[in-house]
Image (cartoon, rainbow, N blue to C red):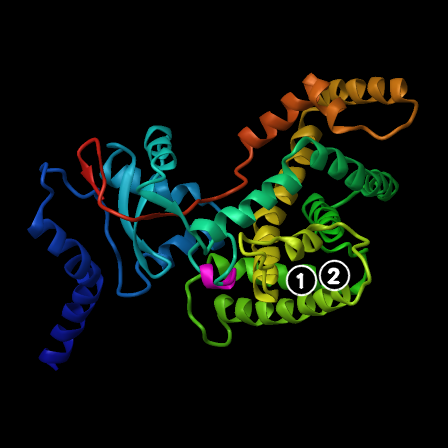
Protein backbone atom coordinates (compact mmCIF):
# COMPACT_ATOMS: atom_id res chain seq x y z
CA UNK A 1 0.00 0.00 0.00
CA UNK A 2 2.84 2.36 0.83
CA UNK A 3 4.43 1.66 -2.56
CA UNK A 4 1.14 2.36 -4.34
CA UNK A 5 0.40 5.54 -2.40
CA UNK A 6 3.93 6.77 -2.86
CA UNK A 7 4.18 5.64 -6.47
CA UNK A 8 1.24 7.61 -7.87
CA UNK A 9 2.55 11.04 -6.80
CA UNK A 10 5.99 10.13 -8.11
CA UNK A 11 4.51 8.96 -11.42
CA UNK A 12 2.49 12.18 -11.72
CA UNK A 13 5.57 14.24 -10.94
CA UNK A 14 7.59 12.33 -13.55
CA UNK A 15 4.94 12.73 -16.23
CA UNK A 16 4.60 16.47 -15.58
CA UNK A 17 8.34 17.03 -15.86
CA UNK A 18 8.98 14.51 -18.64
CA UNK A 19 9.00 17.09 -21.43
CA UNK A 20 11.29 19.33 -19.38
CA UNK A 21 13.71 16.43 -18.92
CA UNK A 22 13.46 15.32 -22.56
CA UNK A 23 13.61 18.67 -24.37
CA UNK A 24 14.87 21.35 -21.99
CA UNK A 25 17.52 19.64 -19.86
CA UNK A 26 19.79 18.71 -22.82
CA UNK A 27 19.67 22.32 -24.03
CA UNK A 28 20.49 23.68 -20.60
CA UNK A 29 23.42 21.28 -20.30
CA UNK A 30 24.71 22.31 -23.72
CA UNK A 31 24.14 26.04 -23.04
CA UNK A 32 24.05 28.87 -25.53
CA UNK A 33 27.40 30.07 -26.93
CA UNK A 34 26.51 33.60 -25.79
CA UNK A 35 25.12 32.61 -22.39
CA UNK A 36 21.50 33.28 -23.39
CA UNK A 37 18.79 31.43 -21.46
CA UNK A 38 15.69 29.58 -22.58
CA UNK A 39 12.42 31.50 -22.12
CA UNK A 40 10.56 30.69 -18.87
CA UNK A 41 7.60 28.30 -18.84
CA UNK A 42 6.58 24.66 -18.47
CA UNK A 43 6.03 22.02 -21.13
CA UNK A 44 3.38 19.89 -19.48
CA UNK A 45 2.71 16.21 -19.93
CA UNK A 46 4.24 13.94 -22.62
CA UNK A 47 2.65 14.39 -26.06
CA UNK A 48 -0.30 16.50 -24.87
CA UNK A 49 1.91 19.15 -23.27
CA UNK A 50 -0.24 22.09 -22.16
CA UNK A 51 -3.06 21.38 -24.63
CA UNK A 52 -5.60 20.71 -21.86
CA UNK A 53 -4.87 24.10 -20.28
CA UNK A 54 -4.88 25.72 -23.71
CA UNK A 55 -8.27 24.22 -24.59
CA UNK A 56 -9.67 25.20 -21.20
CA UNK A 57 -9.02 28.87 -21.91
CA UNK A 58 -9.94 28.72 -25.62
CA UNK A 59 -12.90 26.35 -25.69
CA UNK A 60 -14.43 26.41 -22.20
CA UNK A 61 -13.78 29.86 -20.74
CA UNK A 62 -13.72 31.51 -24.20
CA UNK A 63 -10.96 33.81 -22.97
CA UNK A 64 -7.85 32.94 -25.02
CA UNK A 65 -5.94 36.01 -23.84
CA UNK A 66 -5.99 34.64 -20.30
CA UNK A 67 -3.83 31.70 -21.44
CA UNK A 68 -1.07 34.24 -22.11
CA UNK A 69 -1.95 36.45 -19.15
CA UNK A 70 -1.50 33.50 -16.76
CA UNK A 71 2.07 33.10 -18.00
CA UNK A 72 2.74 36.83 -17.79
CA UNK A 73 1.48 36.85 -14.19
CA UNK A 74 3.61 33.85 -13.21
CA UNK A 75 6.85 34.60 -15.07
CA UNK A 76 6.68 38.34 -15.70
CA UNK A 77 6.69 40.14 -19.05
CA UNK A 78 10.42 39.87 -19.77
CA UNK A 79 10.76 40.01 -23.57
CA UNK A 80 7.34 38.45 -24.14
CA UNK A 81 8.47 34.85 -24.78
CA UNK A 82 7.45 31.64 -22.96
CA UNK A 83 8.23 27.99 -23.60
CA UNK A 84 5.43 25.43 -23.78
CA UNK A 85 4.36 22.27 -25.62
CA UNK A 86 1.33 22.55 -27.93
CA UNK A 87 -0.10 20.52 -30.83
CA UNK A 88 2.38 17.71 -30.21
CA UNK A 89 5.51 19.88 -30.47
CA UNK A 90 7.77 21.90 -28.16
CA UNK A 91 6.94 25.55 -28.79
CA UNK A 92 7.83 29.13 -27.93
CA UNK A 93 4.99 31.62 -27.49
CA UNK A 94 5.73 35.22 -28.51
CA UNK A 95 3.16 37.82 -27.52
CA UNK A 96 4.73 41.31 -27.61
CA UNK A 97 4.83 43.51 -30.75
CA UNK A 98 8.62 43.86 -30.78
CA UNK A 99 9.39 40.12 -30.63
CA UNK A 100 6.56 39.32 -33.07
CA UNK A 101 8.07 41.82 -35.51
CA UNK A 102 11.44 40.11 -35.12
CA UNK A 103 9.90 36.69 -35.90
CA UNK A 104 7.93 37.92 -38.92
CA UNK A 105 10.92 39.72 -40.40
CA UNK A 106 13.33 36.79 -39.96
CA UNK A 107 12.17 34.63 -42.86
CA UNK A 108 15.56 32.92 -43.01
CA UNK A 109 15.01 31.55 -39.48
CA UNK A 110 11.24 31.23 -39.07
CA UNK A 111 9.19 29.71 -41.88
CA UNK A 112 5.40 29.79 -42.09
CA UNK A 113 3.77 26.46 -41.22
CA UNK A 114 0.45 25.05 -40.05
CA UNK A 115 0.26 22.56 -37.15
CA UNK A 116 -1.42 19.84 -39.22
CA UNK A 117 -0.10 20.77 -42.64
CA UNK A 118 -0.90 17.28 -43.95
CA UNK A 119 -4.57 18.29 -44.03
CA UNK A 120 -3.68 20.90 -46.65
CA UNK A 121 -1.99 18.30 -48.82
CA UNK A 122 1.66 17.56 -49.61
CA UNK A 123 1.61 19.62 -52.83
CA UNK A 124 -0.22 22.71 -51.52
CA UNK A 125 1.27 26.19 -51.44
CA UNK A 126 1.88 25.93 -47.67
CA UNK A 127 3.78 22.63 -48.03
CA UNK A 128 6.10 23.07 -51.03
CA UNK A 129 9.11 25.31 -51.50
CA UNK A 130 11.46 26.43 -54.24
CA UNK A 131 10.23 26.62 -57.84
CA UNK A 132 6.99 24.79 -57.09
CA UNK A 133 6.09 27.36 -54.46
CA UNK A 134 7.07 30.29 -56.69
CA UNK A 135 5.02 28.98 -59.59
CA UNK A 136 1.76 28.70 -57.64
CA UNK A 137 2.36 31.83 -55.55
CA UNK A 138 2.88 33.89 -58.71
CA UNK A 139 -0.47 32.75 -60.06
CA UNK A 140 -2.28 33.38 -56.77
CA UNK A 141 -0.83 36.91 -56.60
CA UNK A 142 -1.98 37.63 -60.15
CA UNK A 143 -5.47 36.21 -59.70
CA UNK A 144 -6.21 37.97 -56.40
CA UNK A 145 -4.02 41.04 -55.88
CA UNK A 146 -3.42 42.59 -59.31
CA UNK A 147 -5.55 45.65 -60.21
CA UNK A 148 -7.42 43.85 -63.02
CA UNK A 149 -8.13 40.93 -60.68
CA UNK A 150 -9.44 43.26 -57.97
CA UNK A 151 -11.75 44.91 -60.49
CA UNK A 152 -13.15 41.54 -61.52
CA UNK A 153 -13.61 40.39 -57.92
CA UNK A 154 -15.34 43.66 -56.94
CA UNK A 155 -17.90 43.21 -59.72
CA UNK A 156 -18.32 39.49 -58.97
CA UNK A 157 -19.10 39.71 -55.26
CA UNK A 158 -21.25 42.86 -55.07
CA UNK A 159 -24.56 41.51 -56.47
CA UNK A 160 -24.60 38.75 -53.83
CA UNK A 161 -23.61 41.20 -51.07
CA UNK A 162 -26.40 43.59 -52.06
CA UNK A 163 -28.93 40.73 -52.12
CA UNK A 164 -27.74 39.59 -48.68
CA UNK A 165 -28.07 43.08 -47.19
CA UNK A 166 -31.62 43.37 -48.54
CA UNK A 167 -32.45 39.95 -47.10
CA UNK A 168 -31.03 40.90 -43.68
CA UNK A 169 -33.07 44.11 -43.67
CA UNK A 170 -36.26 42.13 -44.26
CA UNK A 171 -35.42 39.67 -41.48
CA UNK A 172 -34.86 42.51 -39.02
CA UNK A 173 -32.74 40.35 -36.71
CA UNK A 174 -29.88 38.11 -37.80
CA UNK A 175 -27.02 36.04 -36.41
CA UNK A 176 -24.14 38.04 -37.87
CA UNK A 177 -21.61 35.22 -37.62
CA UNK A 178 -23.80 32.69 -39.48
CA UNK A 179 -24.87 35.16 -42.16
CA UNK A 180 -21.31 36.44 -42.74
CA UNK A 181 -20.06 32.86 -43.05
CA UNK A 182 -22.77 31.98 -45.55
CA UNK A 183 -22.18 35.09 -47.66
CA UNK A 184 -18.39 34.68 -47.65
CA UNK A 185 -18.54 31.05 -48.72
CA UNK A 186 -21.05 31.72 -51.50
CA UNK A 187 -18.64 34.28 -52.97
CA UNK A 188 -15.71 31.91 -52.49
CA UNK A 189 -17.63 29.14 -54.26
CA UNK A 190 -18.23 31.43 -57.22
CA UNK A 191 -14.67 32.77 -57.34
CA UNK A 192 -12.87 29.45 -56.89
CA UNK A 193 -15.03 26.87 -58.71
CA UNK A 194 -17.89 28.88 -60.30
CA UNK A 195 -20.45 27.12 -58.10
CA UNK A 196 -23.80 28.73 -57.36
CA UNK A 197 -25.51 28.47 -53.94
CA UNK A 198 -27.22 25.15 -53.42
CA UNK A 199 -27.04 21.79 -51.62
CA UNK A 200 -23.60 20.89 -53.02
CA UNK A 201 -22.05 24.21 -51.97
CA UNK A 202 -23.65 23.82 -48.52
CA UNK A 203 -22.06 20.38 -48.26
CA UNK A 204 -18.65 21.79 -49.20
CA UNK A 205 -19.12 24.55 -46.61
CA UNK A 206 -19.82 21.99 -43.87
CA UNK A 207 -16.81 19.91 -44.91
CA UNK A 208 -14.51 22.93 -44.74
CA UNK A 209 -15.90 23.76 -41.29
CA UNK A 210 -14.91 20.27 -40.12
CA UNK A 211 -11.53 20.55 -41.82
CA UNK A 212 -10.75 23.90 -40.17
CA UNK A 213 -11.42 22.46 -36.71
CA UNK A 214 -8.85 19.74 -37.35
CA UNK A 215 -6.14 22.08 -38.61
CA UNK A 216 -5.72 23.54 -35.11
CA UNK A 217 -6.25 20.38 -33.08
CA UNK A 218 -4.11 17.73 -31.45
CA UNK A 219 -3.18 15.27 -34.25
CA UNK A 220 -5.01 12.24 -32.84
CA UNK A 221 -6.34 10.07 -35.67
CA UNK A 222 -8.98 8.22 -33.63
CA UNK A 223 -12.77 8.40 -34.21
CA UNK A 224 -14.33 11.08 -32.03
CA UNK A 225 -11.38 13.51 -32.27
CA UNK A 226 -11.41 16.67 -34.41
CA UNK A 227 -8.31 15.67 -36.37
CA UNK A 228 -9.82 12.32 -37.40
CA UNK A 229 -13.03 14.05 -38.50
CA UNK A 230 -10.98 16.61 -40.44
CA UNK A 231 -9.21 13.84 -42.38
CA UNK A 232 -12.58 12.38 -43.34
CA UNK A 233 -13.78 15.80 -44.47
CA UNK A 234 -10.64 16.23 -46.55
CA UNK A 235 -11.23 12.90 -48.34
CA UNK A 236 -14.79 13.94 -49.21
CA UNK A 237 -13.59 17.34 -50.45
CA UNK A 238 -11.02 15.62 -52.67
CA UNK A 239 -13.77 13.52 -54.24
CA UNK A 240 -15.96 16.57 -54.93
CA UNK A 241 -13.13 18.68 -56.38
CA UNK A 242 -11.91 15.82 -58.59
CA UNK A 243 -15.44 15.54 -59.94
CA UNK A 244 -15.41 19.28 -60.72
CA UNK A 245 -12.01 18.88 -62.40
CA UNK A 246 -13.38 16.15 -64.66
CA UNK A 247 -16.28 18.40 -65.64
CA UNK A 248 -13.89 21.18 -66.61
CA UNK A 249 -11.65 18.83 -68.58
CA UNK A 250 -14.62 17.66 -70.61
CA UNK A 251 -15.50 21.23 -71.60
CA UNK A 252 -14.36 22.18 -75.09
CA UNK A 253 -13.07 25.53 -73.84
CA UNK A 254 -12.63 27.46 -70.61
CA UNK A 255 -15.96 29.11 -69.82
CA UNK A 256 -15.72 30.15 -66.19
CA UNK A 257 -12.23 31.64 -65.70
CA UNK A 258 -12.24 30.82 -61.98
CA UNK A 259 -9.31 29.93 -59.70
CA UNK A 260 -9.57 26.22 -60.49
CA UNK A 261 -9.37 26.98 -64.21
CA UNK A 262 -6.27 29.08 -63.61
CA UNK A 263 -4.54 26.38 -61.57
CA UNK A 264 -5.27 23.84 -64.31
CA UNK A 265 -3.50 26.06 -66.85
CA UNK A 266 -0.29 26.72 -64.87
CA UNK A 267 2.82 25.26 -66.50
CA UNK A 268 6.42 24.95 -65.35
CA UNK A 269 9.56 25.68 -67.40
CA UNK A 270 9.22 22.30 -69.11
CA UNK A 271 5.60 22.91 -70.05
CA UNK A 272 4.18 20.50 -67.46
CA UNK A 273 0.83 21.37 -65.91
CA UNK A 274 -0.19 20.88 -62.30
CA UNK A 275 -1.47 17.41 -61.47
CA UNK A 276 -5.01 16.85 -60.16
CA UNK A 277 -3.56 16.44 -56.66
CA UNK A 278 -1.73 19.77 -56.90
CA UNK A 279 -4.84 21.60 -58.10
CA UNK A 280 -6.99 20.07 -55.34
CA UNK A 281 -4.43 20.67 -52.60
CA UNK A 282 -4.05 24.33 -53.55
CA UNK A 283 -7.80 24.94 -53.79
CA UNK A 284 -8.19 23.53 -50.27
CA UNK A 285 -5.29 25.54 -48.80
CA UNK A 286 -6.38 28.80 -50.46
CA UNK A 287 -9.97 28.44 -49.25
CA UNK A 288 -8.80 27.71 -45.70
CA UNK A 289 -6.48 30.72 -45.79
CA UNK A 290 -9.22 33.12 -46.93
CA UNK A 291 -12.53 31.72 -45.72
CA UNK A 292 -12.37 32.14 -41.94
CA UNK A 293 -10.54 35.49 -41.98
CA UNK A 294 -12.99 37.03 -44.49
CA UNK A 295 -16.12 35.91 -42.66
CA UNK A 296 -14.71 36.94 -39.27
CA UNK A 297 -13.76 40.39 -40.57
CA UNK A 298 -17.28 40.84 -41.96
CA UNK A 299 -18.87 39.70 -38.71
CA UNK A 300 -16.78 42.07 -36.58
CA UNK A 301 -17.50 44.96 -38.97
CA UNK A 302 -21.24 44.37 -38.49
CA UNK A 303 -20.78 44.17 -34.72
CA UNK A 304 -18.68 47.33 -34.39
CA UNK A 305 -20.98 49.33 -36.67
CA UNK A 306 -24.01 48.23 -34.65
CA UNK A 307 -22.25 49.45 -31.49
CA UNK A 308 -21.22 52.77 -33.08
CA UNK A 309 -24.23 54.30 -34.90
CA UNK A 310 -22.40 57.60 -35.51
CA UNK A 311 -19.72 55.74 -37.47
CA UNK A 312 -22.40 53.81 -39.35
CA UNK A 313 -24.11 57.08 -40.32
CA UNK A 314 -20.89 58.60 -41.71
CA UNK A 315 -20.16 55.37 -43.56
CA UNK A 316 -23.66 55.35 -45.05
CA UNK A 317 -23.35 58.99 -46.15
CA UNK A 318 -20.09 58.36 -48.01
CA UNK A 319 -21.44 55.28 -49.76
CA UNK A 320 -24.79 56.86 -50.64
CA UNK A 321 -23.02 59.91 -52.06
CA UNK A 322 -20.91 57.70 -54.31
CA UNK A 323 -23.94 55.63 -55.32
CA UNK A 324 -25.83 58.75 -56.42
CA UNK A 325 -22.88 59.88 -58.54
CA UNK A 326 -22.70 56.45 -60.20
CA UNK A 327 -26.49 56.38 -60.71
CA UNK A 328 -26.87 52.90 -59.26
CA UNK A 329 -23.88 51.28 -61.00
CA UNK A 330 -21.72 48.90 -58.99
CA UNK A 331 -18.71 50.24 -57.12
CA UNK A 332 -15.35 49.46 -58.73
CA UNK A 333 -12.00 48.82 -57.08
CA UNK A 334 -10.92 52.28 -58.29
CA UNK A 335 -13.86 53.82 -56.38
CA UNK A 336 -12.90 51.94 -53.22
CA UNK A 337 -9.44 53.53 -53.16
CA UNK A 338 -11.12 56.98 -53.11
CA UNK A 339 -13.51 56.17 -50.22
CA UNK A 340 -11.35 57.50 -47.39
CA UNK A 341 -13.77 57.02 -44.52
CA UNK A 342 -14.79 53.53 -45.65
CA UNK A 343 -11.14 52.50 -45.82
CA UNK A 344 -10.57 53.83 -42.29
CA UNK A 345 -13.53 51.77 -41.04
CA UNK A 346 -12.06 48.65 -42.66
CA UNK A 347 -8.60 49.28 -41.24
CA UNK A 348 -9.96 49.95 -37.75
CA UNK A 349 -12.07 46.79 -37.87
CA UNK A 350 -9.01 44.70 -38.72
CA UNK A 351 -7.01 46.46 -35.99
CA UNK A 352 -9.60 45.86 -33.28
CA UNK A 353 -10.76 42.38 -34.33
CA UNK A 354 -8.53 39.38 -33.66
CA UNK A 355 -8.94 37.60 -37.00
CA UNK A 356 -6.20 35.05 -36.28
CA UNK A 357 -6.00 33.88 -32.66
CA UNK A 358 -2.47 32.63 -33.25
CA UNK A 359 -0.02 32.24 -36.13
CA UNK A 360 2.58 29.51 -36.45
CA UNK A 361 6.23 29.72 -37.48
CA UNK A 362 8.80 26.90 -37.58
CA UNK A 363 12.31 27.70 -36.32
CA UNK A 364 14.73 26.19 -38.84
CA UNK A 365 17.78 26.98 -36.70
CA UNK A 366 18.67 28.31 -33.28
CA UNK A 367 17.97 31.98 -32.67
CA UNK A 368 18.61 34.49 -29.90
CA UNK A 369 16.53 37.52 -29.03
CA UNK A 370 17.50 39.91 -26.21
CA UNK A 371 19.13 37.20 -24.14
CA UNK A 372 16.50 34.51 -24.80
CA UNK A 373 17.66 31.41 -26.65
CA UNK A 374 15.28 29.45 -28.90
Q: Decide: marks 2, 1 in contact (CB < 8 A)?
A: yes
In the rendered image, which residue does mark 1 sit on? Answer: 206
In the rendered image, the vertical position of residue 218 relative to residue 97, given as above or below: below
Number of callouts: 2
Q: Nearer the viewer, residue 159 or 249?
A: 249
Residue 294 lies left or right of residue 12; in this view the side is: right
Going 60% across and 48% down the picture, which residue do you hit?
A: 292
Q: Quadrant of residue 346?
A: top right
- Specify whether residue 331 is painted magenta: no
Q: Nearer the viewer, residue 261 or 296?
A: 261
Looking at the magenta stretch, what is its main secondary structure?
helix
Return the x and y of residue 141 as percentages of the image width and height. 59, 40
**Magenta residues, start to end:** 117-121
SS class of the residue under badge 2? helix
In the rendered image, which residue does mark 2 sit on? Answer: 202
- Cα–Cα gap, marks 2 and 1: 6 Å
SS class of the residue under badge 1? helix
Going 78% across and 57% down the picture, which residue do you hit?
A: 195
Amino acid sequence: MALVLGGFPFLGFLLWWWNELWYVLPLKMRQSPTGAKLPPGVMGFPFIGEMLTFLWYFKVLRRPDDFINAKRTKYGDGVGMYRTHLFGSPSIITCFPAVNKYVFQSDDIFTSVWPNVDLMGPTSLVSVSGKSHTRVRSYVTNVINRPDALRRIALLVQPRIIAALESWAQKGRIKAFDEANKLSFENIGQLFISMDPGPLLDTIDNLFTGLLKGVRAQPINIPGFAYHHARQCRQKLDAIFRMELEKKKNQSEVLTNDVMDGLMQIKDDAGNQLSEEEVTDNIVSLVIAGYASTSLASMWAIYFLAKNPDVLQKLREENMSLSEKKKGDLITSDDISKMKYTNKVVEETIRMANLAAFIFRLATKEAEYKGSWN
